[in-house]
Amino acid sequence: MSQSDADRVYIFDTTLRDGEQSPGASMTLEEKLRIAEVLEAMHVDVIEAGFAIASNGDFECVQAIAKQIQNSSICSLARAALGDIDRAAEALKGAANGRIHTFIATSPLHMEYKLQMQPDEVIEAIHKSVSHARNLIPNVEWSAEDATRTEIDFLCKAVETAIRAGATTINLPDTVGYATPDEYAEMFRSVIARVPDADKAIFSTHCHNDLGLAVANSLAGIAGGARQVECTINGIGERAGNAAMEEIVMAIKTRGDVLPYHTGIETKEIMRASRLVSTVTGFSVQNNKSIVGANAFAHESGIHQDGMLKNAETYEIMTPESVGVTKTTLVMGKHSGRHAFADKLKELGYQLGDNAFHDCFRRFKELGDRKKNIYDEDIIALVDDEVATA
Ligand code: KIV
Ligand code: ZN
């Protein structure tokens, strides 16, 4: 493996599966296809298109996406049940590169209360399900649901079983968003060091955001040896959501000095994907959301606007163009300073003398105290009035 291959992080997008599991986010086949097309244009490595056994609708979505999308691998989720796996394989028949993703919980809590299975029975189920999937398709991912609350010796045994049975990707999810970054990194280090033939599989992160740590944990997982990240556009997903793809990708791109990895993502498509997912699901993106929020490249304070007008790097660590945003916005409001106001007047086509400028700037500040948002029309009205009464 060359150095650059070793540092490549594969992006597995689960907007259409885990993202769709957010209450209220269900999508039609047509909407899922549109999103899958944008994900393909972003060069996402793996698109989890759905859970084929869950409903006929889900089956049809996986099938349609598998037929349509040629450049990303298409994946269907399946429990550790032969019927689930067969249904996933059936849905993936037309795929250029299909993947079956089968999972079972490994934590004591899930095994005892949810599955009502003994640990040995779970190991047996892993062996059976992964072997069965591998007989149907060469690309098999196995997940240890609730891995972060699983006892480490048992987790290693489960992972070893899955790799022996032919799993090519091993996913260790933080299903309930419980881990901290140090713990999550350590879990990967430990499993990769202890499991024989760990190098036969790619290890994967899958983080939920219950404590707001999903992105930090995903990056820690990479530091611990994972080379696939499971994530969603805008971070949508069960409960508090999944790790946001745009944040992980841009963190890696922006901080290559301390995160020496790379993804294949075409970052200029990020904003388009974010808007589409928001429109389709009806989930608005909060204004201050990293990368894709309306304010992510907007500046209001006078000091910041002045800095931005002199050199954008003063207050922007990535360019808006790099994520598909047309340009930085200097929001006009009570915090704006003379420099930004003068720039705005120039943009609106005004050239004022010193006295008129001084008066207009004073009236603009007064307006800012009364009005939250100052639009171009407000400034035009103010300047026209000043010119008319001068
Ligand atoms: O959060 C989780 O554990 C999952 C698995 C099904 C991969 O979504
Ligand atoms: Zn999940």
Image (cartoon, grey):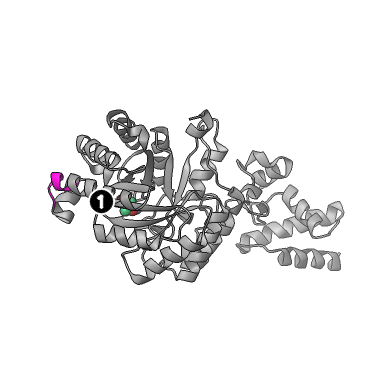
Horizontal placement of 255 versus 108: left or right?
right
Main SS type for the magenta part? helix
Tag 1: Cα neighbours inside 10 Å, few (<14), some, or many (≥20)? many
Q: Find residue 130 and report its horizontal and vertical position in percent.
A: 28, 48
Q: Residue furthest front?
A: 135
For the image, the number of numbered tags is 1
Horizontal placement of 376 versus 269: left or right?
right
Q: Which residue is mark 1?
A: 129
* Depth order, front residue of 239/166: 166
Q: Residue at x 17, y 50 (%)?
A: 111
The kind of secondary structure element at disc 1 is helix
The span shown in magenta is: 117-122
Q: Find residue 126 and report its horizontal and vertical position in percent.
A: 23, 47
Q: Is residue 174 visible?
A: no
Q: Which of the 4 image quadrants contains residue 237?
A: bottom left
Residue type pointed to by label 1: Ser
* Depth order, front residue of 337/63: 63
Q: Find residue 308 and report its horizontal and vertical position in percent.
A: 69, 44
Horizontal placement of 349 versus 304: left or right?
right
Q: Residue at x 32, y 46 (%)?
A: 173
Q: Which of the 4 image quadrants contains residue 316?
A: top right
In the image, residue 369 above or below residue 199: below
Horizontal placement of 378 versus 354: left or right?
left
